[in-house]
Image (cartoon, helix red, strand yellow):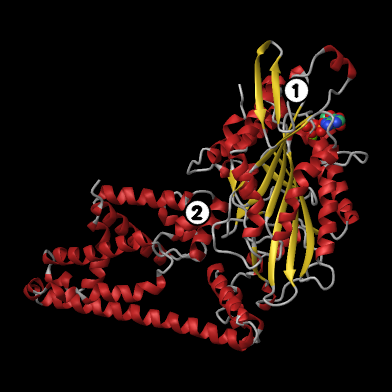
Amino acid sequence: MDAGAKARPRRREMAAATSGAGRCLSKGGSSRRPPPARVRVAVRLRPFMDEETKASEPSCVRGIDSCSLEVANWKKYQETLKYQFDAFYGEKSTQQDIYVGSVQPILRHLLEGQNASVLAYGPTGAGKTHTMLGSPEQPGVIPRALMDLLQLTREESAEGRPWDLSVTMSYLEIYQEKVLDLLDPASGDLVIREDCRGNILIPGLTQKPIASFSDFEQHFLPASRNRSVGATRLNQRSSRSHAVLLVKVDQRERLAPFRQREGKLYLIDLAGSEDNRRTGNQGIRLKESGAINSSLFVLGKVVDALSQGLPRIPYRDSKLTRLLQDSLGGSAHSIIIANIAPERRFYQDTISALNFTARSKEVINRPFTNESLQPHALAPVKPSQKELPGPSEAKKAKGPEQESTGSPASVTAPAPASEKLSLLGKLCSMDPATMESLLSLDRLLGSQGSHGTPLLNTPKRERMALIKTVEEKNLEIERLKMKQKELEAKVLAQEAQDPKDKENSPTVLQPLPSCTDTVAKPLRKAVVMPLQLVQKQAESKIHILKRGHKRKLEPSIASKPVEKAEDCWELQISPELLAHGRKKLLDLLNEGSVRDLRSLHLIGQKKAQLIMGWRELHGPFSKVEDLEQVEGISGKQVESFLKANLLGLAAGQNCDPS
Ligand code: ADP
Ligand code: MG
């Protein structure tokens, strides 16, 4: 039986795609869909740990070649399972072999502003920590990668080179579904968030700048010691928690257009994948096992969903998978190293580890270059090599949704409460989508070269002019809205006075939809088309309904046409449709991505992010009206939101022939 055969025909195609990933995304960035890169999988077999066992039992695992192996069931020898992976490292392989063969090749992507991750998977005692960390005599992947990365960044940022590079490190542990900062053990459970670009962030996580390998050791060794002290005290806690070292490479272009890039490297020593039901754990160990099992169980579900191309990937079901969201099926070049052991007692765990890894190699990532313009032209930023604040300081200094890096999102200061914002302040508090448009404009102007320096590099004057234009446009929109209301009132009043006329000349209502269009367009440019159409249909239905409705109204009621018609909008939808629409909206609010939320009426980029942020903090909304609790969304806005979307959905249902 060949358990790895299924994925074999795709190997060459995927390998070609992976090697082209860096080239395709040029330094200038590209709007093309990033090319795919399959998750790479390597298997490492450790040697027998003692001569006695080695002499008394044959190995369960046998290497076939540099990519394949077979596992023998010693109870049933005809039951031999064959697997093929990207690489197989036998018991004689060295730390250097694994590093050079499987890890070193992906490091270069970090300097292209792309993400990478290395995960050690396998049962406890199979060699994960040995592979990742190693010993002073046999250093593993972590020290080797850090050594190389620091050397590479030094070379790349030498004087005269176009980019200035800096490296920071964070070190955390996920233990019983808690994210703990190993560089600041006093800090409690940290939250994991996603920014508008889909990057995973941990606000408040300590980041230490490291310029040399000794800087790295200075922070890493005490943190690791903390962890291993815990191991003896807390029943080998280290094998029950996931240890995550995060290394960020930040690049800043020295000359215009002053781009910046960030590449993240995750080096992860996962908790043991053994089936703890078989190990007979009890008490705290059972509790730990439960947490670990659920975390690794979700990892398995995520891998399954990704490899089967399912629409919903359960990343949010565990801390580990949430953290790995941009590494598995996301934006990273990923390698999983499955560590296995030769002894019989590991047989079941070896099979399940290999099956998990075989499924993982079907997962396709789409790494892209994480590039933007440096924010220094917008607001003063901290010097790049200054020590970043620890979580407690960071938490005090920043809002909860900000990460302690110089990423574009983190320099976007929250808008001050004061009405009298400075113009520069306004620019800083602009929502990311608007800021991104400004940055693209700036890039465009910058690329025109001869016409002066880029806009965002010039003094305040140009920026003020731009802000003024935006404000004028906003006023114009407000003015048009008022005009629309007046027109509507006028038409309705006219209808009330002379219903016969109205019936004979339905074209009286014609100006309304076109007027709505004029006003709505600039506001709704980000809303997807199908809903817009639905909204238009809904709007035209309102007018028809208003007409029908008013025929039954008493004259005294008809004298207040606008308010009445608006108040009664819910009556225009059947109770079933209303309930169905509300449920649909609630589901979207609770489960939708930023993009899904933006497809709703009256929800732009900023509101979508506010909703996501609230959801992260407080959990799901219990009813749509809870939106009012989101800072920045008023009760009135919730009313308008409900009206626009429920009418839109109802009109969609009415039009739906099914
Ligand atoms: P895990 O982290 O998966 O629980 P460890 O890395 O702690 O496993 O390995 C268990 C033991 O096996 C350790 O004593 C380690 O030094 C040893 N070991 C693991 N892999 C190898 C290897 N490839 N060569 C020599 N010793 C190894
Ligand atoms: Mg270990």
Q: Is residue 131 left or right of residue 137?
A: left
Q: Is residue 614 left or right of residue 383?
A: left
Disc 1 on helix, strand or loop?
A: strand
Ligand 2 shows up in the quarter that is: top right
Tell me residue 17's x, y (percent).
61, 49
| Residue pictured at 32% horizontal, 48% vertical | 580
Q: Is residue 297 left or right of residue 572?
A: right
Tell me residue 428's x, y (percent).
61, 74
Q: Contact (CB < 8 A) between labels 2 and 1?
A: no
- Tell me if residue 395 can be seen: no
Dot 1: few (<14), some (14–19), or many (≥20) neighbours within 10 Å? some
Circle 1 is placed at which residue position?
62
Residue type of the residue flagged with mark 1: Arg
Q: Quadrant of the N terminus?
A: top right
| Residue pictured at 93% horizontal, 39% vertical | 137
Disc 2 on helix, strand or loop?
A: loop
Residue 103 appears in which quarter of the rendering? top right
Name which of mark 2 and mark 1 comes first in the sequence: 1
- Tell me if residue 31 can be seen: yes
Who is closer to the viewer here, 179 or 449? 449
Circle 2 is placed at which residue position?
593
